[in-house]
Amino acid sequence: MEKKKPSARSPKARKPRGPVKKYAYDLRLYVAGQTPRAVKALENLERICKEHLSGQYRLVVIDLLKAPKLARGDQIVAVPTLVRKLPTPVRRIIGDLSDTERVLIGLDLRER
Amino acid sequence: MLKSRSARPKPPGIRKSPTGIRGLDEITMGGLPRGRTTLVCGGPGCGKTLLAVEYIARGILEYGEPGVFISFEESTEELTDNVSSLGFDLRGLSRRGLLAMDQVRIEKSEIEETGEYDLEGLFVRIGSLIDQVKAKRVALDTIESLFAGLSNDAIVRAELRRLFHWLKAKGVTSIVTAERGEGTLTRNGLEEYVSDCVILLDHRVENQIATRRVRIVKYRGSMHQPNEYPTMIGSHGLSVMPLSSLGLDYPVSKVRVSTGIKRLDSMLGGRGYIRGSSILVSGSAGTGKTSFAAAFADRVCRSRQKCLYLSFEESPAQLIRNMSSVGFDLQHWVDKRLLQFRSQRVSAFGLENHLVNLQSWVDEFSPFAVVIDPTTGLSQEGESSEILAMLTRIVDLLKSRGITAFFTSLSKGGPGWETSEVSISSLMDTWLHLRNIEFQGERARGLVVVKSRGMAHSNQVKEFLLSDTGVELCDPYIGAGEVLMGSAREAQEAKEKEQAIEEMQAFEQHQNETQAQRRSLEARIDVMRLRLKSLTGEMKASLSREELKQSRLSQERSRMRVARKAE
């Protein structure tokens, strides 16, 4: 399992630069500050990934308060938003990710 | 209405952020409420986006206020291309750092919602753009897409309410567009959150002609014009026609403008129309209305003033050709740029488009006089009440600028002509009516001054002739209890002329005869004088002979006495 703790780093460093190692799942979690909801979302996500995507994913957490310009590229409106960049097509899951079933559906790990 | 306008800049009132859109600032009495959010709602294609873009672009260009444009529908590239045809270079403004644009795209099919969320992401994006250009103005077009993209209405509503508060706190003036709903202003009831100012745009099709209108539904803390106003998207963007707000306070002039027809000037108090007044020439088909218009246009150009000629029936080339046949060389005025023709089919646009076009032409050309030939062409469009409203606006527009307006109007003819123009006649200061008068099997053209405010004018029906030297007025034959026109008048005049000649000849003859008599009398007097003279001479001679004889006799007698030696 690979995970990058994001918040302290500069936005550039957080951007995945080319596939050093190809992960099946490239995930980004956008939050706006360390709100309880953001913390909850990250906890939920880590739990789900551990259970279902062990070793196959990379997760980058992006704090929009520190890097507001990044919201544009992934069309972030709501927070928290989880963006599945890979595999394509891009999927967005918004909310605190408390509904595991829906998250799995959103990540195409469950039949719709 | 006017008083409220002059009361606009009162200090305690709310501050305004002018839109720069022609007319809109007038009906909002200065613009949108500064530092607050304005809702612009309307159906599809009624110009909401354009209004928002113009507010931002004009804010930058005309008021030096940087802006942010957030599009929820079109991509920024599409939007930039769409408005570039209206003269707004959004790319250039972005490059100069005065404008920040972004597209917020929410694709529902890509989104799964799980649990609680908020729209802080949107706030962050807007906030960073505001900070980037130090924006004073923000447009969100169409924010309702959020409702379509996100399924939790309650969250969206709460967040929108927060967004508007947040924008207010940021100190920016914002404009939010929303789609009109069934029976409500907006589909999602946004008007509940945006309560400072609501502008409704409308796009109706009546008689196959689309008409745009705008109305200020609500403007908290400010006076505003309550009516619906025609709106148009022209080559310079959106414009609103608030002209009915002008009221009746235009400056008046005493300066006169020649009609271009000498005798007509004298019918109108000797000096023609009043400058800045509105003139109507009505008449049935073929009475020469256009010739009167051309005479006026020609006269205006002759005095080195500019004239704008709107033709709804003839193309400029045709008009110039036709008018050259009655002696008006309009082409060389066109060449000298004193005369400008604008021809268009009435049906080409809706009524308000004609109005807006007229306004922009007047702005560009700033003519001394405007000819509209004919106004009746407009009645193909819309209801008669609309035409009246439109003509009122035209008259107001031109009068407020001191432009003399010359209208022609095709009337039905017949005995009802006076009532047929009743509606527009009240707008007109001078009304000339041209009539075909059928008389003894021919038609003559008659002219009557129905009214002419502010001057003494002739009451007589004049006959006029269209010749290759222009329009010529002549007195009808009035005498022996009848009025004659046309060739009957000519015949009558010829007859009278003949009579006069005869009388003159008789007089001359009589004069000659008397002269001759006098001369013969004088001759006789001369003869008698001569005879008298000779008689006198004769008398003198006989007298002297007699005296001689007497003296001789006395001499003889004395000699005899001496001879007889008497005593």
Image: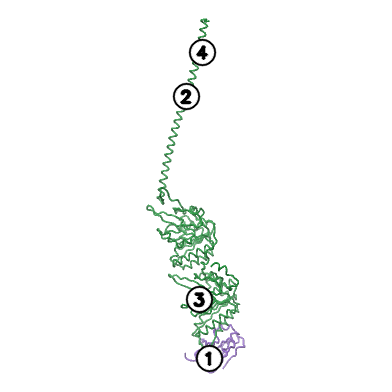
Chain colours: A purple, B green
The amino acid at mark 3 is Cys
Q: Please say if the residues under marks 2 and 1 sit with CB atoms less than 8 Å apart.
A: no
The disc at residue B551 is: 4
| Residue hosting label 2 | B532
- Dot 2 alpha-carbon crowd within 10 angstroms: few under 14, some 14 to 19, many 20 or more: few
Classify mark 1: helix, strand or loop.
loop
Q: Which of the 4 image quadrants contains residue A41? A: bottom right
Classify mark 2: helix, strand or loop.
helix
Q: Eyeballing the image, is B514 above or below B122? A: above
Q: Which of the 4 image quadrants contains residue B58? A: bottom right
First of labels 4, 3 by sequence position: 3
| Residue hosting label 3 | B41
The amino acid at mark 1 is Ser
Front disc: 3 or 1 = 3
Q: Which of the 4 image quadrants contains residue B508? A: top left
Q: CA distance from mark 3 to mark 1?
A: 37 Å
The amino acid at mark 4 is Ser
The amino acid at mark 2 is Leu
| Residue hosting label 1 | A98
